Image (cartoon, helix red, strand yellow):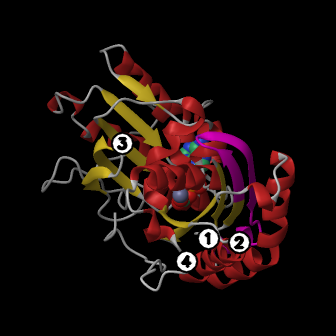
């Protein structure tokens, strides 16, 4: 099955073509116009998506050596994200699906980060603990099976990547700054200054980064993996999963019998390949495929901005 996928939830315009779970192309265009503002400007993001989406989709088809007539289903991010940005990619993808008369699969961006470790033949075993650490989200999820998962922890304030980005801004490193801090930290002295760790009293699985903007990596200490006896597996994903120190910390867990998955860097930050994979998984695991028929009057996919539908 050939899947064409589109991602425009924030400041990356991305399109990908997959053959089942195998990525044939994954084109990502990161908008740089936000850099001078120190964060994503929603209206600018929508405009850039609108300008680029058509060319990015064509490029992803070209580099996959597939044509529109080869596409069996179309998937797009529909939630959560910046409303203007979501609307561009989602409606572009819907129109294409309508024209080609193929199913359209709405994808939840967070679920896509969660399943990004299933790309290209990789098959983490269920159940596992998923940690999503990105610019906009920090979630700890217990995953029993495909689309059977429960959020068990989340940040009470900033997202992990946001904490990195704000810190980078304070240090004059530009936006987004997570990878700059990562690079500079390698040459730094870990013990030079101890930043305070915020303990969230109400739940040991929740996170808080607002008071400790320069110590995002400490959150690992709050996760008591020993308590989750049945889950010897974990999957880490999202832009911040590219962080060296975070990977180092998780690698230590492998010594105590845990199997840990990290996505390749091109699938860690926002990308359409993970959207295509999640669309594919959704399609093969949904019995009533008419749910994905755009011609159907019952079709309800619309952008959402929260975790309600997770
Ligand atoms: O997943 P992503 O592309 O966007 C969201 O869905 O939010 O993640 C982007 C975030 C940014 O905050 C960026 O600073 C951070 O990931 N990031 C990193 C690293 N590479 C990207 N943070 C820490 N270390 C890195 N190596
Ligand atoms: Zn993301």
Give the mark, 1 or 2, whose residue is nearer the N terminus: 2
Alpha-carbon neighbours of circle 2 within 10 Å: few (<14), some, or many (≥20)?
A: some
Q: Which residue is mark 4?
A: 294
Residue 181 in sight here: no
Q: On the image, which quarter does residue 14 sit in?
A: bottom right
Give the mark, 1 or 3, whose residue is nearer the N terminus: 1
Alpha-carbon neighbours of circle 3 within 10 Å: few (<14), some, or many (≥20)?
A: many
Q: x and y percent of residue 57 in the render?
A: 78, 63
Say which of marks 4 and 2 sits in front.
4
Q: CA distance from mark 2 to mark 3?
A: 30 Å
Q: Is residue 111 above or below residue 217?
A: below
Say which of marks 2 and 3 sits in front.
3
What kind of element bears circle 3?
Answer: strand
Give the mark, 4 or 2, whose residue is nearer the N terminus: 2
The reply to whether dot 1 and dot 2 touch (C-beta < 8 Å) is: yes
Task: Return the mark for residue 99.
Answer: none
Say which of marks 3 and 4 sits in front.
4
Viewer-proximal residue among 162 and 255: 255
The reply to whether dot 3 and dot 4 touch (C-beta < 8 Å) is: no
Q: Which residue is mark 1?
A: 39
Residue 203 in sight here: yes
Q: Residue placed at 42% from the left, 82% from the top?
A: 298
């Amino acid at each position: 099955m050939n899947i064409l996928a589109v991602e425009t939830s924030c400041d990356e315009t991305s399109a990908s073509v997959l053959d089942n779970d195998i990525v044939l192309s994954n084109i990502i265009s990161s908008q740089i116009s936000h850099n001078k503002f120190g964060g994503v400007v929603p209206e600018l993001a929508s405009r850039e998506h609108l300008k680029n989406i058509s060319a990015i989709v064509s490029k992803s088809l070209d580099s996959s050596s597939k044509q529109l007539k080869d596409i069996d289903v179309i998937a797009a991010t529909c939630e959560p994200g910046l409303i203007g940005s979501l609307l561009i990619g989602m409606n572009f993808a819907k129109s294409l699906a309508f024209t080609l008369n193929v199913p359209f699969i709405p994808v939840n961006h967070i679920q896509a980060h969660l399943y990004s470790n299933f790309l290209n033949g990789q098959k983490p075993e269920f159940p596992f603990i998923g940690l999503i650490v990105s610019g906009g989200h920090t979630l700890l999820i217990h995953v029993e099976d495909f689309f059977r998962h429960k959020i068990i922890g989340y940040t009470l304030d900033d997202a992990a990547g946001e904490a990195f980005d704000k810190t980078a801004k304070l240090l004059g490193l530009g936006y987004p700054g997570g990878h700059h801090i990562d690079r500079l930290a390698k040459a730094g002295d870990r013990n030079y200054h101890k930043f305070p760790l915020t303990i969230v009293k109400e739940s040991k699985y929740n996170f808080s980064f607002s008071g400790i903007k320069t110590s995002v990596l400490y959150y690992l200490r709050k996760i008591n993996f020993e308590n989750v006896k049945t889950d010897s597996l974990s999957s880490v994903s999202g832009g911040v999963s590219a962080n060296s120190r975070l990977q180092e910390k998780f690698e230590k867990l492998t010594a105590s019998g845990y199997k840990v998955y990290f996505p390749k860097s091109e699938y860690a930050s926002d990308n359409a390949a993970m959207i295509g994979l999640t669309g594919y998984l959704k399609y093969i695991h949904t019995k009533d495929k008419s749910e994905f028929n755009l011609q159907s009057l019952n079709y309800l996919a619309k952008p959402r901005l929260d975790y309600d539908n997770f």
